Image: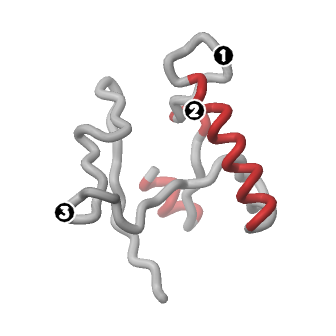
Amino acid sequence: MWEEMERSGRYTADERYLCMPESEDGPCSHSHYAYLWMVEQMKRVVGPAPKGVRYPIWAWYKRYGSPTGKPDMRAYMRQHDRPQVRLKLDVPD
């Protein structure tokens, strides 16, 4: 991910690393349909995605119930057999 950001100046969601099987038999199958629904809502409200982007990158402003506002990546949305990254983004007002 870091190498892509350095090379191209941007990062996009890579479908190979998403836990959203299109099969209806997996434990995360509902996630795929929910994610596609959200993508369609964003197209309707925000507009079309940039060229080459299928899925958005999700970010938290503040995580509800967290004393720091950050999600606890040890317990929340964690696939323990795969590494994860949490980035801090400074977004100008």
In terms of image quadrants, where is residue 78? Answer: top left
Residue 85 position in % (x across, y down):
34, 48
The residue lying toward the viewer, choosing from 31 and 51, is 31
Identify the residue at the far front of this view. 65
Q: Which residue is mark 2?
A: 31
The residue lying toward the viewer, choosing from 2 and 35, is 35
Residue 42 position in % (x across, y down):
71, 58
Position of 24 compared to 85: left or right?
right
Q: CA distance from mark 2 to mark 1?
A: 11 Å
Residue lying at 36% horizontally and 60% vertically, measured from the top left: 87
- Crowd class of label 1 (few under 14; some 14 to 19; many from 20; radius 10 Å): few
Closer to the observer: label 3 or label 1?
3
Query: Mark 3 or mark 1, which has the lower sequence index?
Result: 1
Query: Mark 2 or mark 1, which has the lower sequence index?
Result: 1
In terms of image quadrants, where is residue 83? Answer: top left
Q: Amino acid at mark 3?
A: Pro
Q: Amino acid at mark 1?
A: Ser
| Secondary structure of the residue carrying numbered label 1 | loop
Identify the residue at the far left of this view. 67
- Crowd class of label 3 (few under 14; some 14 to 19; many from 20; radius 10 Å): few
Q: Amino acid at mark 2?
A: Ser
Q: Which residue is mark 3?
A: 67
Residue lying at 45% horizontally and 79% vertically, measured from the top left: 91
Q: Which residue is mark 1?
A: 23
Position of 60 compared to 52: left or right?
left
Q: Is residue 80 above or below residue 49?
A: above
